[in-house]
Amino acid sequence: MTRHDPSLTSLAQSALAELRANVALPFERARAMPKSVYTSPDFAEAEERHIFAKDWLCAGRADALPNPGDYLTMEIAGEPVIILRDREGGLRGMSNVCRHRMSTLLEGRGNVRSIVCPYHAWTYNLDGSLRGAPAMGLNEGFCKEDVKLPGVRVEDWLGWILVTLNPEAPPPREALADVEALVGYLDMGSYVEAFREQFTWDTNWKVLAENFMESYHLPVCHEGTIGGTVDLMQMTCPEGLPAFNYHWIMKNDSLPLTLAHPSNTRLVGDQRRITWLLSIYPSLMITLTPGYFWYLSLTPKGPGQVQVLFGGGLAADWSADPEAGAHFAALKSLLDDVNVEDKGCVERVYRGLCAGLSSPGSLSHLERPNYDFARYIAGQMP
């Protein structure tokens, strides 16, 4: 029986019905997701409420906030949020909206001793409690002790800052236990971030997510960079799990940073050269190698744009190498070139999705993660 939810518009319900019909087919007969799932403003709005407002999202790496008062800001389904390192050294999340006249408080990243509203200078401690409010003494109903910025759940999971508006979401250590079982031998928490950037591309967030999930495009789209380091015949794309999908690539020796550091004696055999591609739903994409990592954390901006948080760095032993600076520079230069190639690919796909004569085609066996992602999207909707 088809489910209908009164919170969805008729256009969103129509797109969802198309998607559910799509994933009802076995993978061997699967096609790409329907165009409406990418292009419909109504479906994009439904994703904000039923996916981004309810699941865990990534704000980057925990080592981006090393000191008390270090903060970053983000927006979750239209909700401005602050993530900061408190005076006790813990991560804390809270609303980024003043409890007075509802101005937003902080922007970007930085370090503060307290949070001062730029409108009327109401001042909050790093735990969100109100420290001071000028010229409020004559309001008989005002009590400073009753005012506090609403808290937002935040956790450090294997070095990642994960945030959710949902008080009932299972903790990441439970929901993502299978990720740790799969790649725990690489000790993600010890990797060192070297860069963190943000930019906006003209495509749907799911197009970029799917582009990351499949390596079928690597030899062609990335012919000028990393395409030569992979062999499609040695690529494995298993069935995904409820909270994430993954695949791995056995890398050759053409890019040393992809491999375990020569001094590393802990990793053995294929562990020294396997690259993992982890797509943690809804929008954290991690490439994890024995030598380096990079990631994308995606925030939709309507159906036709996506804000991208892009970061990466090196494994601890590569970071400790005397030539670490050169390694970081080489990695960043490579990834910048890869990004240019990916931007062209995903923006061309979105233009094609908006064309009248286009239609979704059959999936390759190397696109199994895309099918699992479609099933996740369909399953999260009411």
Image (cartoon, helix red, strand yellow):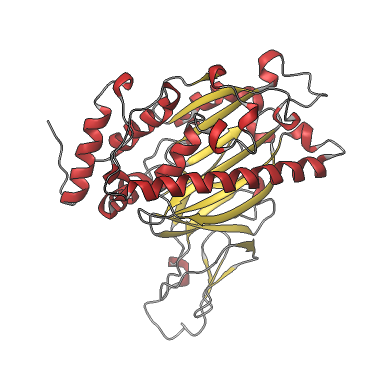
Task: Report the side of 255 relative to 27 (left or right).
Answer: right
Q: How many marks?
A: 0
For this orientation, the residue located farthest to the left is: 1
**Which corner quadrant holds the C terminus?**
top left
Quadrant in which residue 233 is drawn: top right
Q: Give x and y (percent) for residue 238.
A: 45, 19
The residue at 46%/83% (across/down) is 137
Task: Report the side of 308 relative to 6 (left or right).
Answer: right
- Compared with 269, 201 (above or below) is below
For this orientation, the residue located farthest to the right is: 322
Q: Give x and y (percent) for residue 139.
A: 40, 83
**Which corner quadrant holds the N terminus?**
top left
Quadrant in which residue 234 is drawn: top right
Task: Report the side of 16 relative to 184 (left or right).
Answer: left
- Compared with 254, 282 (above or below) is below
Task: Report the side of 134 relative to 331 (left or right).
Answer: left
The residue at 57%/44% (across/down) is 341
Task: Let me know if residue 178 appears in the view.
Answer: yes
Q: Give x and y (percent) for residue 41.
A: 29, 55
Task: Let me know if residue 193 appears in the view.
Answer: no
97 vs 284, nearest the viewer: 284
- Compared with 68, 26 (above or below) is above
The residue at 41%/76% (across/down) is 101
Q: Give x and y (percent) for residue 369.
A: 43, 28
For this orientation, the residue located farthest to the top is: 269
324 vs 231, nearest the viewer: 231
The residue at 37%/28% (across/down) is 372
